Image (cartoon, grey):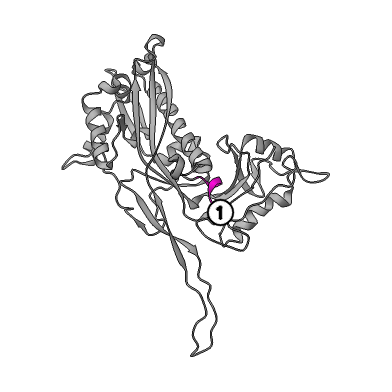
Amino acid sequence: MLPTHKKIGPLSGISEFQKSPFATKGHSSKSENLMRAAYSLRSVLLQGQGLQGYELEVSEAIKSESGIQSTGVAIPLSMFSRDLSVTSNGQLVETHVEKSLAENLQPYSVAIRAGANVIDGIKGNLTFNRIATTALPGWVPEQTAGSGNSTTFSIASLSPKLLQTSIAISRQLIAQSSPAVEQLIMEQLKRSVATSIDAAVFNGRGATTYNEPLGILNWQENTTSTFDYAKRAAGVAFGTTNAPTWSEVLTLPYNVEASNVEPDDSCVFVSSPLGKNRLQKTQKATNYPIMIWEDNSIAGHKAYATNNVNSNQLIYGRFSSVLIGVWNIFLLSDPFVYATQNQVLVTIQRMADVAPLYGVAFAASSNGLS
């Protein structure tokens, strides 16, 4: 089980999470579960901007609590994790809710599967102190001034940034009262949300020009002799992109560990399918029949491929050192634009951001594999 809301450092506003939109004054956990079970995703999708009733009240509660407004309908993040069954009178009933948002997105997101920290239901901006340079101790004789230097800090923050995509769903499919149908629709939504998160984690171009999170491949890079924790560790340039060497690949984890980053289970390699293919065809040494990428691992670390590394670069990192913040997810349902095709156009809006806890826990090649 992936932990969420874990203690990651001195965060301001870390306790400012949104209250459950199903909570009422004097409520019990049982009554909250009943309120959540009555929520109908089908109503949200079929009614679109004309949404009325209970689901609209829940949406307004989420918007009010988070302070983020949208023309879309805010859906509870817990909808991503509920299981449904059908009663004797044909009603959908929630039977089990347990998984966190991170666990539900894990099958579709390489970053989350690798161990990235996910904080969901955030209220407002989130800022935290981050070590920029570590203190260097110094031995001193008695009655002599110390010679060690002090730790310096930088500020990192998470602030909501909007990303949206659209999918077309059959109206007949939405109208069916089958739990399998709602689960199928939710799987499509999960995949869309997870894919957008991965794109931001790896390739986000920053807020200044593009209003995007800043992704790993666009973080600044240290030299081999500097260790600014807000930047990536020094990388490597492949001498020949279609013939990377074993030594070049091993440079990435070496530079990370040389930056005083202890490896853990979240230390993995990530590249594109093309990068994976190249490394699967490249021997560690001439006439040595062991490939660099074998059994989805490199140098004893798990290795993942995703099209969200669209530059075909090779990344190595301790993914527990990256933070993903999720505020709200909104749905804008348009039952008219594709009415003649009996489809409903669903636009999904995500408010999210990405920030490094320790940038030096990551290193990347400066050029892509081919």
Rendered position, 339 above or below 111: above
Q: Residue at x 34, y 49 (%)?
A: 125
Residue extending farthest right: 287
Q: Residue at x 64, y 57 (%)?
A: 254
Q: Residue at x 25, y 41 (%)?
A: 65
- Do we see residue 291 in this rendering? yes
> Label 1 sits on what residue type?
Arg
- Do we see residue 1 in this rendering? no
Residue sitting nearer the eye, 65 or 226: 226
Q: Residue at x 74, y 39 (%)?
A: 242
Residue 217: say if magenta.
yes
Residue extending farthest front: 209
Residue sitting nearer the eye, 350 or 204: 204
Rendered position, 315 above or below 90: below
Q: Which residues are magenta?
A: 215-221
Residue sitting nearer the eye, 53 or 124: 124
Q: Position of residue 164 (x, y in %)?
A: 41, 31
Q: Quadrant of the C terminus?
A: top right
Q: Quadrant of the N terminus?
A: top left
Task: Tell me which corner region of the image, top left, top right, bottom left or bottom right, holds residue 337.
Answer: top left
Q: Position of residue 201 (x, y in %)?
A: 50, 43
Q: Position of residue 177 (x, y in %)?
A: 33, 18
Report whether 295 appears left or right of 355: right
**Residue annotated with mark 1:** 232
